[in-house]
Image (cartoon, rainbow, N blue to C red):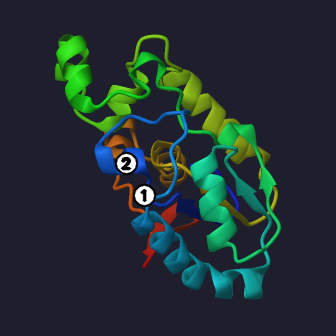
Amino acid sequence: MNDFPKIWFLRHGETEWNAEGRIQGQMESDLTERGIAQAHHQAELVRPILQREAPPCLVSPLRRAQQTAKIALGGAAFDTDPRLAEVQAGVFQGLTRAEIAATYPEIHARAQTNLDLFCAAPEGEGYATFHARVLTLLQALKAPTLIVAHGLWGQVMRGIICGLDYDELADLPNEQGCVYRLENGCETALR
């Protein structure tokens, strides 16, 4: 198990495409009213952390994470890092799962989880490259850090920190509106 600093991880709030069941990957979609409310709830959870610990904050460059960070961090300064972008899901970006099932039935049938599906996308980033990108960011962290990014990005990060194998990390929940605290190889969800 690697020795990473403490991390507080926030997945962005629900987006229009999340609500429609549409694959976003690195495409853009705005927060829904529910997503905005989730970000406000995260702000309540994060406020004492920001006051007590004052960690550096890193945020994905994608709009939904930026929107979430502006609310959840309550005006605290943050840096944007391109390594925090969600997995690039190739030709699946913009499609619903039903559209993928109709057009790519073999891939859809093999994909047991969202991570399987996104990483199997033709012209996509693929798991090995995605995992390496997440690990590179984690290895660059020098101090406890607050991160605002994406569901699958968070699953891979959380799996790396907790020493999980692929199947275990692919099955992790992807909650919105909470904060995952990762420390000493363990995860706690703050709700």
Residue matched to label 2: 18
Task: Classify mark 1: residues with Cα within 10 Å, few (<14), some (14-19) or many (20+).
Answer: many
Residue 186 image point, x, y percent: 49, 65
Quarter containing the C terminus: bottom left
- What's the residue at 40%, 67% (across, down)? 34
- What's the residue at 74%, 56% (across, down)? 58
- Position of residue 92 relative to residue 160, above or below, is above
- Position of residue 83 relative to residue 32, above or below, is above
Residue 86 image point, x, y percent: 55, 38
Label 2 element class: helix
Dots 2 and 1: beta carbons under 8 Å?
yes
Q: Is residue 122 left or right of residue 144?
A: left
| Viewer-nearest residue: 154 or 99 | 99
Kind of residue at badge 2? Asn
- Position of residue 110 relative to residue 79, above or below, is above
Kind of residue at badge 1? Glu
- What's the residue at 52%, 51% (across, down)? 30
Residue matched to label 1: 14
| Viewer-nearest residue: 77 or 163 | 77
Q: From where the camera sits, is residue 178 visible? A: no
Q: Is residue 158 left or right of residue 74?
A: left
Q: Is residue 85 left or right of residue 93?
A: right
| Viewer-nearest residue: 6 or 173 | 173
- What's the residue at 19%, 12% (across, down)? 106
- Rendered image quadrant of residue 56: bottom right
- Position of residue 160 relative to residue 52, above or below, is above
